[in-house]
């Protein structure tokens, strides 16, 4: 089955931005008068919980179960996360850069008429802001589906976000390819039947990427070559549509 659709993760894949998220979480905690601070090691662990609201709730249940048991805890977390999202948006406005090869591949797929979708645990407002700051306001409309955290109850590694994206594309999972950066994202896509290419990000270097078609340090650019950590770039300096299609065809030949 030839490659008929591309599904993009956002955080860590379009941009290597979990440090922006971490900074926004910590700023929201400080503004709320909380003495919580997520250092990198703590955040690395907490990234095992997808969804910012779920991540905060998980942290409080572990650190301060008495607070978590209080009535109104859900509202407290919701308000704290809303402030974090506002602060994250301001960080995006201050400047954010797409990872190597992302703009090139999104543009190549658009010009080739290859449908694209987004499947991300983060919220729509974050996706809109990130794309507006990097690719321009109009680009979001070029995606056949934008599956964001608000649309599902089960976040990654559950397949729900990818199933929403596939529905928007009108394609079967096996006809598509997902570009992800974490093991949780890999599991979510594969649970929806979507083969995956991994671009490792700052916090995902030690993840288990078994089952990925290929693992690269980035999608690369001609003047900033990609490095294959698993799978082969077939002597190409960077990941292009043809290579994604060839990797995808390997499965078709295999199955
Ligand atoms: C990554 C996530 C998100 C972000 C924080 O999403 O798990 O929760 O870490 O963003 P993905 P929010 O890799 O699926 O793009 O606070 O908006 O959840």
Image: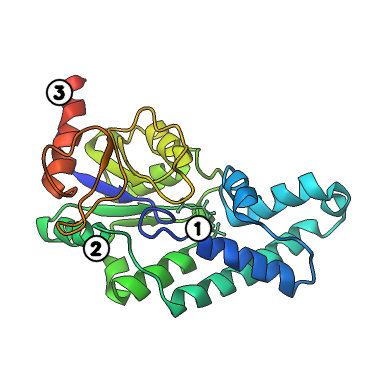
Query: Viewer-proximal residue, 144 or 39?
Result: 39
Residue, disc 3 = 253
The location of residue 158, given as percent across then percent down, is: 50, 38
Residue at the (15%, 23%) spot, across then down? 253
Classify the position of the C terminus by image quarter: top left
Q: Earlier in the sequence, mark 1 or mark 3?
A: 1
Q: Earlier in the sequence, mark 3 or mark 2?
A: 2
Q: State the image quarter where residue 83 is shown.
A: bottom right
Residue, disc 2 = 103
Residue, disc 1 = 18
Q: Earlier in the sequence, mark 1 or mark 2?
A: 1
Query: Viewer-proximal residue, 240 or 161?
Result: 240
- Residue 93 appears anywhere in the view: yes
Rounded to the nearest angstrom, the CA distance separating label 3 from label 2 is: 29 Å
- Give the label on residue 110, or none: none
Residue at the (82%, 60%) spot, across then down? 72
Q: Are marks 3 and 2 in contact (CB under 8 Å)?
A: no
How is the model colour-coded?
A: rainbow
The location of residue 33, given as percent across then percent down, is: 79, 71
- Mark 1 residue's CB less than 8 Å from ligand 1: yes
Q: Are marks 1 and 3 in contact (CB under 8 Å)?
A: no
Q: Specify the farthest residue to the top.
A: 255
Residue at the (73%, 74%) spot, across then down? 31
Rounded to the nearest angstrom, the CA distance separating label 1 from label 2 is: 19 Å
* Disc 2 secondary structure class: helix
Query: Viewer-proximal residue, 38 or 93?
Result: 38
The location of residue 102, given as percent across then percent down, is: 27, 58
The answer to whether residue 222 is above or below residue 5 is: below
Classify the position of the N terminus by image quarter: top left
Q: Nearer the viewer, mark 1 or mark 3?
A: 1
């Amino acid at each position: 089955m030839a490659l008929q659709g591309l599904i993009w993760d956002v955080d860590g894949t379009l941009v290597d931005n979990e440090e922006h998220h971490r900074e926004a979480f910590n700023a929201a905690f400080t503004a709320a008068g909380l003495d919580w601070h997520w250092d990198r090691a703590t955040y690395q662990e907490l990234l095992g919980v997808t969804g910012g609201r779920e991540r905060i709730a998980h942290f409080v249940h572990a650190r301060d179960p008495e607070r978590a048991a209080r009535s109104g805890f859900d509202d407290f977390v919701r308000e704290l996360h809303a402030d974090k999202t506002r602060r994250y948006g301001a960080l995006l406005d201050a400047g954010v850069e797409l990872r190597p090869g992302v703009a090139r591949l999104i543009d190549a797929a658009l010009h080739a008429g290859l449908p694209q979708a987004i499947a991300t645990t983060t919220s729509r407002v974050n996706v809109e802001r990130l794309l507006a700051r990097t690719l321009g306001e109009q680009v979001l409309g070029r995606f056949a589906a934008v599956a964001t955290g608000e649309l599902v109850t089960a976040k990654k590694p559950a397949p729900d976000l990818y199933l929403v994206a596939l529905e928007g594309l009108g394609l079967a999972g096996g006809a598509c390819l997902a570009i992800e950066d974490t093991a949780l994202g890999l599991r979510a896509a594969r649970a929806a039947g979507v083969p995956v290419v991994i671009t490792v990000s700052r916090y995902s270097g030690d993840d288990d990427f078994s089952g990925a078609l290929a693992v690269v340090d980035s999608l690369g650019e001609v003047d900033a070559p990609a490095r294959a950590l698993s799978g082969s770039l077939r002597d190409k300096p960077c990941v292009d549509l043809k290579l994604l299609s060839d990797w995808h065809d390997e499965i078709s030949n295999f199955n």
